[in-house]
Image (cartoon, grey):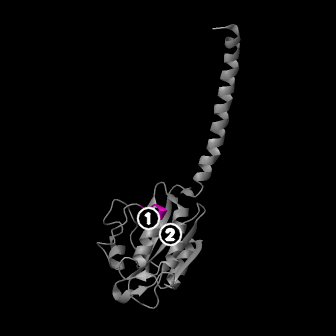
Amino acid sequence: MSLASAARRPRFLIFLAVTVALLAASIGPLTQFANAATLDCGPAKGAFVFVRNAGANGLGHVGWGYRLTCEGAYAYGSVENPTGKAHIDKGFDNGFWTGTGTETQMLADMRTHGYNSYKSITTAKATFDTDPADVAAAASGGRGYDVIGNNCADNVWDVLHAYGVPDLPYLQLLPAPNMWYAALGRTSNVEWAKSATL
């Protein structure tokens, strides 16, 4: 090895170390930004399913709720299908509505909309993704309605699945919303709280 190349080696190693340090510093903020919509709040009621047992001629009707912030803001809503039609074309009014507020405000609003009970899921480390749930919830308004395959329970399932709730009961096996609501926590390893009255 020549004296010139030996002299260049320490400078190259310093350059390499500085480059690696700068890359590590720039990746950190990017990773934090990419996960900005992921909630990691510790023990928390992350998601809710609301039921109106008398809805749809006794088959039941369900709505959804999920935590937006660690400070306790929630998004909630449903597809109501107030006309009772078996089919509504995409893009037409299917009775979709949504709201945001504290847990107390959410429960009061759902009660005002005729829901009579709810179940919530609490985990030791509630890590959920709000952005996909927001997208799924907003899409509910334009997707029309079908008694089978695109009803209130299908919308709730899609929103909570996008939020990250695991092991939701299969709608194909439990087509009536009351049946699906009753199965929450019974047909999976996920612990849902017992049904509470609004």
Instruction: Identify residue type, mark 2.
Output: Ala
| Residue 188: numbered disc | none
Residue at 47%, 84% in the rendered image? 80
Residue at 51%, 80% in the rendered image? 110
Residue where numbered disc 2 is placed: 136
What stretch of residues is rendered in magenta? 161-165
Q: Label 2 to label 1, Cα distance in Å?
A: 9 Å
Q: Is residue 190 left or right of residue 102?
A: left
Magenta segment: does it hold 95? no
Mark closest to the chain's N terminus, 2 or 1: 2
> Residue 190, percent across and down?
37, 60
Residue at 40%, 76% in the rendered image? 153
Residue at 52%, 85% in the rendered image? 112
Q: How many marks?
A: 2
Q: Do residues under tags 2 and 1 come within 8 Å of each other at their CB atoms?
A: yes
Q: Main secondary structure of the magenta part?
A: helix
From this viewpoint, which residue is outermost toward the bottom? Answer: 83
Identify the secondary structure beneath mark 2: helix
Please determine whether, in this image, residue 175 is positioned above or below residue 123.
below
Residue where numbered disc 1 is placed: 161
Q: Residues within 10 Å of mark 2 (few under 14, many from 20)?
A: many
